[in-house]
Image (tube, rainbow, N blue to C red):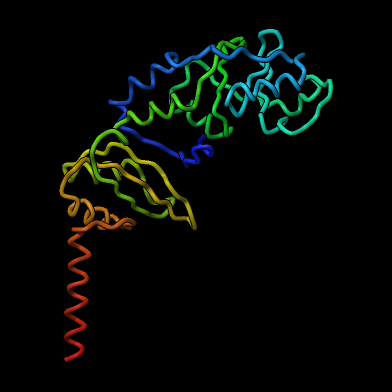
């Protein structure tokens, strides 16, 4: 799961030409194996369902009108006696997806609500099925960001000073392709951005980022800029010791 996957998916850009087919096929992943639970169902029966199905949440409906989702952790270790779901409506979580959402919007929904099952509603708020988190993680694994061979580069800059447009221009000016980029950390008004680049001579790209006041966070074996600085530092130290 995403927190449950605990991924910090704050912003994303992922080669949208290659990704377009994924963004338009979310309906292929609609599942209907698990029937929604009626609000008049006894909670003890729902507890038994969670033992049968390995999900964090299950959908709840009133006939076929969506009510929300009941979380396993909210009812797992409590004896509710003869109470029904409608008696604990304040513990029903009203998140859902729609058929026209892109896969990334659905993935964000999974992350926001810390769930591995996402109910799907039609425009009339009627339940029509659900998505499983695992299917959407598999879609993500097929994107160029993870699938293509390349170089991972982590850079940082002031939170109000960077732009993905500038980053893309820097990468492309060095004859490389940007497969994807995401904000992986924000701290003290500084933002760290993780990039996936095509294989190329990384040194010129590193120099270009430094010229635009980006800091390079991760290290490379053949970072000529740092080698030169170290050489100059060693030479200066030797000079001072003469």
Q: Compared to 226, does 204 lie above or below?
A: above
User: Quick one: 74 or 124, which is closer to the camera?
Assistant: 74
Image quadrant in which you'd find residue 34: top right
Q: Position of residue 150 (x, y in %)?
A: 23, 41
- Report which quarter residue 217 is drawn in: bottom left
Q: Is residue 194 above or below residue 141?
A: below
Q: Which x, y percent locates residue 133?
A: 49, 27
Where does residue 72 sit, x and y in percent of width and height? 66, 29
- With 27 as the anchor, is 93 left or right in this view? right
Figure label count = 0
Choose between 167 and 95: the one closer to the eye: 95
Furthest residue toward right: 82
Q: Residue 6: x and y, percent?
A: 50, 41
Residue at the location (17% across, 46% down)? 174
Residue located 32% across and 25% down the image = 19
Task: Looking at this view, name the residue that lies furthest to the top.
Answer: 63
Picture residue at 58% right of the left edge, 32% below the top: 113
Compare residues 142 and 188 and report the one nearer the observer: 142
User: Residue at left 45%, top 16%?
Assistant: 29
Name the image quarter holding the C terminus. Answer: bottom left
Above or below residue 160? Residue 109 is: above
């Amino acid at each position: 799961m995403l927190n449950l996957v605990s991924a910090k998916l704050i912003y994303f850009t992922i080669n949208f030409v290659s990704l377009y087919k994924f963004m338009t096929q979310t309906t292929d992943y609609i599942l209907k194996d698990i029937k929604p639970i009626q609000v008049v169902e006894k909670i003890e029966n729902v507890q038994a369902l969670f033992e049968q199905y390995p999900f964090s949440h299950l959908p709840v409906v009133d006939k076929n009108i969506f009510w929300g989702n009941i979380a396993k952790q909210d009812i797992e270790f409590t004896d509710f006696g003869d109470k029904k779901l409608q008696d604990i409506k304040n513990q029903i979580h009203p998140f859902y997806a729609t058929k026209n959402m892109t896969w990334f919007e659905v993935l964000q929904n999974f992350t926001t609500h810390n769930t591995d099952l996402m109910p799907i509603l039609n425009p009339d708020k009627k339940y029509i099925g659900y998505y499983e988190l695992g299917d959407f993680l598999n879609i993500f694994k097929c994107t160029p960001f993870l699938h293509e061979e390349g170089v991972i580069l982590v850079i940082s800059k002031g939170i109000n000073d960077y732009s993905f447009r500038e980053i893309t221009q820097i990468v492309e000016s060095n004859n490389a392709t940007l497969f994807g980029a995401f904000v992986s950390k924000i701290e003290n008004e500084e933002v760290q951005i993780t990039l996936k680049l095509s294989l190329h001579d990384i040194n010129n790209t590193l120099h270009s980022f430094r010229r635009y006041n980006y800091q390079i966070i991760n290290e490379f074996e053949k970072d000529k800029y740092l080698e030169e600085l170290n050489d100059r530092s060693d030479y200066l130290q030797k000079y001072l010791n003469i």
